[in-house]
Amino acid sequence: MFEDMTHQRVVITGVGLAAPNAASLPEFRHKLLNGQSEICEIEHRYIGVVPAGICKFPETKYRKKKENKRGTRAGCLGVYAANEAVNDAGIDFTEYKRSRTGVYVGLTEHGTVETENEVYNISQYGYDVDYWTHHHNPRTVLNNPAGEITMNLSLTGPHYAIGAACAAGNAALIQGVQMLRLGEVDMALCGGISESVGSFGIFASFKAQGALAHHPDPRKASRPFDMDRTGIVISEGACLYCLETLDRALARKAKIYGEIAGYAMNSDARDFVMPYGPRQAECVQLALERAALAPQDIHIVNTHATGTRQGDIEECRALAGIFRDCPATWFNNTKGMIGHAMGAAGVLELAGNLSAFNDGVVHPSINVDKLDTECDLPNLVLNEARPVDRVEAIMNTSFGMVGVNSVIIVKKYTA
Amino acid sequence: MTRDAIKDVIIEIVQDIDEDAETVNLDADEPLRDQLDLDSMDFLDIVMELRKRYKLQVPEEDYPELASLNSCVNYLEPKLKDL
């Protein structure tokens, strides 16, 4: 009864996104190639003025203001990105049934924003819980952003959230691939969303760890690999992909961004916050093995580095060990331009590199004025975009708290 | 608070929930939910807003009293008479 789909090739055919500097993939690519950050300052209750990445996109393009008000910011971001992805893929649900479409959304956290807001709300009424909103539960269930997408697009297949800290977007992308290969769904709408900028607590917690970025010019606050980095810039964002099996994508003559060639996830099993390079390296190796690729075959490694000293160095050590004899492998980082979009980070950053299959350019890591010598990877693309000879495989790394690591490899599509 | 003022408050609350709501030609005797894009969660927003604005607790058994504009006014008039 079940067709063996486990070896099916899976391709990306649509990308929808909202980033702190763009509301579409072409705009995003343009900004990244020009090294353009639009990180701004926001003022948050209790914590004051902080640098943050805020997405500007047409919020009522795909649903009414009333629905945005009832739902969550993550839902609003997700509905926009999901519609953009589906439109980009040219999917009108004639080839695909809505009941055979799955929505898998990676979230670093969810509900923090809404809970903080409600506690603040009842504080204005002497903490009388009669003033606690009836919207709190539907807003804070973990499947909320994915569920808001299904309601908006009338998708009746499965939807749920994947929690994997800042590796969550990649984890959801992997989930999409797996569900397609298991034959659970025919089309997967998957990726990551973050509304974390709405939470003062997330800023405060990074601040308490000494890991919250600050700079007089917010556009310079996020500076992975730079000696003068001060930590993480928190951003909101969303990036959702349409994934299909290759044969179905070819059958409907879909545009193909790339093929998911390999992926891996593993766990540090050590520490709540400190990253661990050796385990990250194992994760990279596993993804390479599954993709049947050698390190030399990867032409862009889009790094996770967030702008914390230890995190940047651990990752660079792990990568330097694996890619030591790879003259055609280039390294970059997207967070200097968009901050850390948490659950959306990996998928958003990967999306920003996919166009390199066509334009052959590696976008730069910006704000690196004094390169940390411990992050001096060979072929690190700094401050200016770099045209390269060949881009046939792109790797994205995304790591998260409590020791969760993810690696995705996308290959240029070739028959 | 006059009957007209109460009616205005209800319309204001509805517009705050949905600014696209067409409140101009509402039939005051017909249920709001039949005329507007409102569901039970929106209805609870009205109850919450009355609580926030006037410290007015509407017990669940009285919810049907808030069905139409006129029934709202009839129900709220004695409760808001001193405002």
Image (tube, coloured by chain):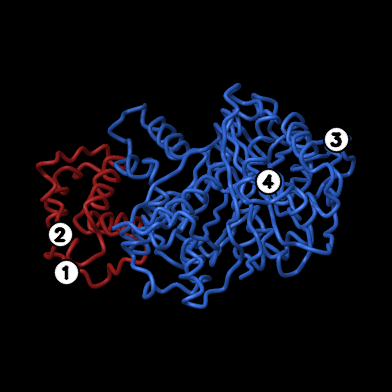
Chain colours: A blue, B red
Q: Residue at x 64, y 51 (%)?
A: A292
- Given the image, what chain letter belongs to the residue carrying mark 1? B
Residue A34 to residue A398: above or below: below
Q: From the viewer's perspective, is A391 left or right of A327?
A: left
Q: CA distance from mark 2 to mark 3?
A: 65 Å
Q: Position of residue A271 (x, y in %)?
A: 60, 22
Q: Which residue is mark 1?
A: B27
Quarter holding residue A355: bottom right
Question: What residue is disc 2 on?
Answer: B68
Q: Earlier in the sequence, mark 3 or mark 4?
A: 3
| Badge 3: residue crowd in 10 Å (few <14, some 14–19, many ≥20) | some
Residue at left offset 64%, top offset 69%: A414
Please state if A144 lies on the left or on the right of A45 as rendered: left
Label 2, label 1: how far apart the Cα atoms are: 8 Å
Q: Disc 3 is attached to a residue of which chain?
A: A
Q: Is residue A285 left or right of residue A259?
A: right
Q: Residues within 10 Å of mark 1 (few under 14, many from 20)?
A: few
Q: Residues within 10 Å of mark 4 (few under 14, many from 20)?
A: many
- Say what secondary structure mark 3 lies in: loop
Please tell me which residue is depicted at 36% across the width and 75% down the height of the picture: A94
Which quadrant is the C terminus of chain A positioned in?
bottom right
- Secondary-structure class at tag 2: loop
Which residue, given by chain and number where applicable, does mark 3 sit on?
A: A227
Q: Is residue A67 visible?
A: no
Q: Residue A199's mark?
A: none
Rendering coords of residue B26 (x, y %): 21, 69
